[in-house]
C-alpha cells in the first residue's frame, strides 16, 4: 500500500510541479467547448436538439480525459529514457504494484483535469440535469481514464523512444475522439460512421456521462457500463502484461 | 566459505550474437572485485543479469545465497546498484528520491527519516535535500545515487562505471566512501571502470572480460605475472585484450550491426 501511495504521489507531484503546463493542458478543450458550444448552438437549437453547450460538455470532458490519459504512457517512455525505470525495476517491489501506483497517479491527474473543466463549464452556463448523478458521471470518468491509462502504459512499454510513442498516440487519439459521439448525436450520421462509432469504446464513455449529466442516452447506461468495464479489463491486462515484459 | 556472488556457465545471446559466453566466477564476502573489459565486451550485460534486469539465456547465478532467476525479491533486497546512466527522478528533490527508495525497500517508517538524514550527510547533500535533481551537477547526482543505494543496507554493492564523467576530486571522494564502506561494514563491492588506475588502487581481485569470455582473473600482481611481468595493470590489460580490441575496431561495424539487429529482433519478439 505504502509503495502504491508513494508512486502515486510521485506522479501527482511531477504533474503539479510542471507549472504553466498544468494550465496549458486546459486550453485546447476549453477552446473546443466555448467555440463549438456557443458557435454551433444556434444551428443545433434550430434543428430541434436543444442547447449544444449542454450536449457538448460531456464530450469535452471525455476529450480531456482521453487526451491526458492517452499521453500518460509517455511517462513510461521518459522513465526508461531518464533511467528511473531501472531504479523501480531492480527494487523488490512487484511490477504489478509499480504499474498500479504510477497508473493511479495518471488517473488522478486526468480526473483532476476533467473536474476542473466541469467546474468551468458550469461557470459558463452548463447545467447538469441532476446534481445527484454527478458522482456517477465521475465514476464513469474514472473508468474511462483507467482504461486509457492501462492501454497507453502498454504502448509506452513497447516503444523505445518518444517519437514512436507520439506517433502511435496521434494515430489513435484523434479518430477515437472524432469518431465517437463526443461532438454529435449518432442518430442522424451515415450508417458506416455509426457502425464505427458503435465499435468505439469512447462513444460509450461519452454516452454514460451524457446520460448522467443531461439525461440523454443512446445506448443505455447498463450497456455503457458493460462495454467500459470490458474495455478496462482488456486494456489493463494489456498494459500490465507489456510492463511485466520490459527488460531494462 | 560460501561466495556472495557465484556465476556458473552464464550465457546471454541476442539472436545469434553471444554477448556473454559461458563465464564462471565467484566473489567472496567482503571482497572488492573489479570487472574490466573493453566496450561491448559483456560487462553491462553481466551486471544486468546479476541484478535481475535481464534474464540469462542459460547458466546459474547466485547472489547472497539466492538464485537470481528464481528468488528475485530476496536477491533484490540483497544488493544496491549505481547504474552507468543516471537513474534519479529529475523533477523530484533529493529527499523525495531517497524517500521513494526507502518505501520501495520497505524500510520501517520510524527509521526512514533518520537513515535518509544520515546518508545525505555522509555524501554532503543534506543542505541540498530540498533541491530538485535537475539543478544538481553530475557529481552531486552520483553521490546521491550512492547514498540511495546504501539506504537498505545491501550486502553487495554494484557500481557500473560509477566515476564516468566525474572530476578527479569527486572520483577521489567516491572511492574513499566505497573503501570505507567495505572496511567498516564488510560490504562486498563489484564494480566496472575504464580507469585502470582506479581498479589497481581499489580492487582486491580483478576479472577481465573480452568478447563475452573471461580472459584473466586474479589480483593485480597475478595479472602482471601472468602477462610476463608487465609494469602495471594497464599494460597487463592491453596485453590481454589489446590485439582483440584492434581487431574489434576493424570489425566493430559488422559486429555492432549484427548485434543491433539481434537486439531489435529479440525485442520485437
Image (spheres, rainbow, N blue to C red):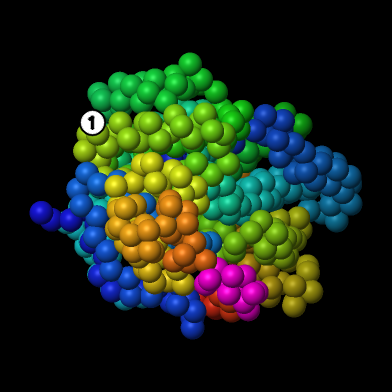
The kind of secondary structure element at disc 1 is helix
Expressed as whole percent of the image width and height from the top left, the position of residue B168 reads 54, 33
Expressed as whole percent of the image width and height from the top left, the position of residue A20 reads 72, 30
What is the number of callouts on the image? 1
Highlighted range, magenta: B243-254
The residue nearer to you, when weighing A150 against A221, is: A150
For mark 1, what is the residue? B184
Image position of B213 (left or right of A181): left
| Among the 4 quarters of the image, the one containing residue B150 | top left
Expressed as whole percent of the image width and height from the top left, the position of residue B117 reads 36, 21
Q: Can residue A191 be seen in this view?
A: yes
| Among the 4 quarters of the image, the one containing residue B254 | bottom right
- Location of the N terminus of chain B by quadrant is bottom left
Label 1 packing within 10 angstroms: few (<14), some (14-19), many (20+): few
Expressed as whole percent of the image width and height from the top left, the position of residue B202 reads 36, 42
Above/below status of A45 relative to A184? above
Q: Residue at x 76, y 55 (%)?
A: A183
Q: Which residue is drawn at 30% across and 21% down?
A: B114
Q: Which residue is drawn at 53% across and 62% down?
A: B39
Q: Mark 1 — on which chain does it sit?
A: B
Residue B248 shown in magenta: yes
Q: Looking at the magenta stretch, what is its main secondary structure?
A: helix
User: In the displayed image of the protein, which residue is found farthest to the bottom?
Assistant: B16
Residue B39 shown in magenta: no
The residue nearer to you, when weighing A222 against A143, is: A143
Amino acid at each position: 500500500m505504502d509503495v502504491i501511495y508513494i508512486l502515486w504521489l510521485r506522479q501527482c507531484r511531477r504533474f503539479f510541479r510542471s507549472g504553466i503546463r498544468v494550465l496549458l493542458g486546459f486550453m485546447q478543450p476549453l477552446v473546443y467547448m466555448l467555440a463549438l458550444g456557443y458557435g454551433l448552438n444556434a444551428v443545433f437549437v434550430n434543428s430541434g436538439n436543444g442547447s449544444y453547450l449542454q450536449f457538448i460538455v460531456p464530450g469535452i470532458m471525455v476529450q480531456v480525459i482521453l487526451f491526458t490519459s492517452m499521453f500518460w504512457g509517455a511517462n513510461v517512455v521518459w522513465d526508461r529514457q531518464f533511467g528511473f525505470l531501472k531504479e523501480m525495476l531492480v527494487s523488490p517491489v512487484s511490477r504489478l504494484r509499480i504499474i498500479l501506483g504510477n497508473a493511479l497517479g495518471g488517473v488522478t491527474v486526468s480526473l483532476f483535469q476533467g473536474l476542473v473543466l466541469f467546474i468551468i463549464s458550469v461557470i459558463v452556463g452548463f447545467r447538469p440535469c441532476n446534481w445527484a448523478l454527478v458522482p456517477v458521471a465521475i465514476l464513469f470518468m474514472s473508468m474511462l481514464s483507467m482504461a486509457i491509462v492501462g492501454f497507453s502504459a502498454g504502448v509506452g512499454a513497447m516503444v523505445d523512444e518518444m517519437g514512436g510513442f507520439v506517433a502511435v498516440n496521434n494515430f489513435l487519439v484523434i479518430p477515437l475522439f472524432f469518431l465517437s459521439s463526443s461532438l454529435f448525436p449518432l442518430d442522424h450520421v451515415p450508417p458506416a460512421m455509426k457502425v464505427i462509432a458503435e465499435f468505439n469504446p469512447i462513444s460509450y464513455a461519452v454516452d454514460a456521462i451524457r446520460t448522467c449529466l443531461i439525461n440523454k442516452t443512446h445506448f443505455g447506461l447498463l450497456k455503457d457500463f458493460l462495454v467500459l468495464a470490458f474495455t478496462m479489463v482488456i486494456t489493463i491486462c494489456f498494459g500490465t502484461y507489456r510492463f511485466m515484459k520490459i527488460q531494462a | 566459505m560460501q561466495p556472495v556472488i557465484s556465476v556458473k556457465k552464464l550465457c546471454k545471446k541476442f539472436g545469434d550474437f553471444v554477448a556473454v559466453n559461458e563465464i564462471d566466477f565467484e566473489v567472496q564476502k567482503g571482497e572488492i572485485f573489479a570487472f574490466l573489459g573493453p566496450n561491448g565486451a559483456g560487462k553491462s550485460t553481466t551486471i544486468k543479469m546479476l541484478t535481475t534486469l535481464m534474464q540469462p539465456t542459460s547458466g546459474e547465478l547466485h547472489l547472497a545465497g539466492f538464485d537470481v532467476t528464481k528468488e528475485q525479491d530476496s536477491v533484490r533486497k540483497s544488493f544496491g546498484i549505481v547504474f552507468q546512466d543516471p537513474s534519479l527522478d529529475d523533477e523530484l528533490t533529493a529527499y523525495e528520491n531517497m524517500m521513494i527508495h526507502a518505501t520501495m525497500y520497505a524500510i520501517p517508517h520510524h527509521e526512514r527519516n533518520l537513515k535518509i538524514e544520515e546518508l545525505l550527510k555522509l555524501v554532503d547533500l543534506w543542505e541540498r535535500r530540498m533541491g530538485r535533481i535537475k539543478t544538481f551537477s553530475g557529481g552531486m547526482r552520483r553521490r546521491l545515487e550512492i547514498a540511495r543505494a546504501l539506504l537498505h543496507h545491501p550486502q553487495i554493492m554494484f557500481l557500473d562505471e560509477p566515476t564516468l564523467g566525474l572530476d578527479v576530486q569527486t572520483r577521489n571522494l567516491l572511492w574513499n566512501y566505497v573503501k570505507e564502506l567495505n572496511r567498516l561494514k564488510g560490504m562486498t563491492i563489484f564494480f566496472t571502470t575504464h580507469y585502470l588506475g582506479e581498479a589497481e588502487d581499489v580492487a582486491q581481485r580483478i576479472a577481465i572480460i573480452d568478447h563475452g569470455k573471461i580472459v584473466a582473473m586474479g589480483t593485480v600482481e597475478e595479472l602482471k605475472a601472468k602477462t610476463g611481468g608487465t609494469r602495471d595493470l594497464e599494460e597487463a590489460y592491453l596485453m590481454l585484450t589489446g590485439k582483440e580490441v584492434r581487431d574489434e575496431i576493424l570489425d566493430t561495424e559488422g559486429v555492432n550491426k549484427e548485434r543491433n539487429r539481434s537486439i531489435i529482433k529479440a525485442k520485437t519478439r
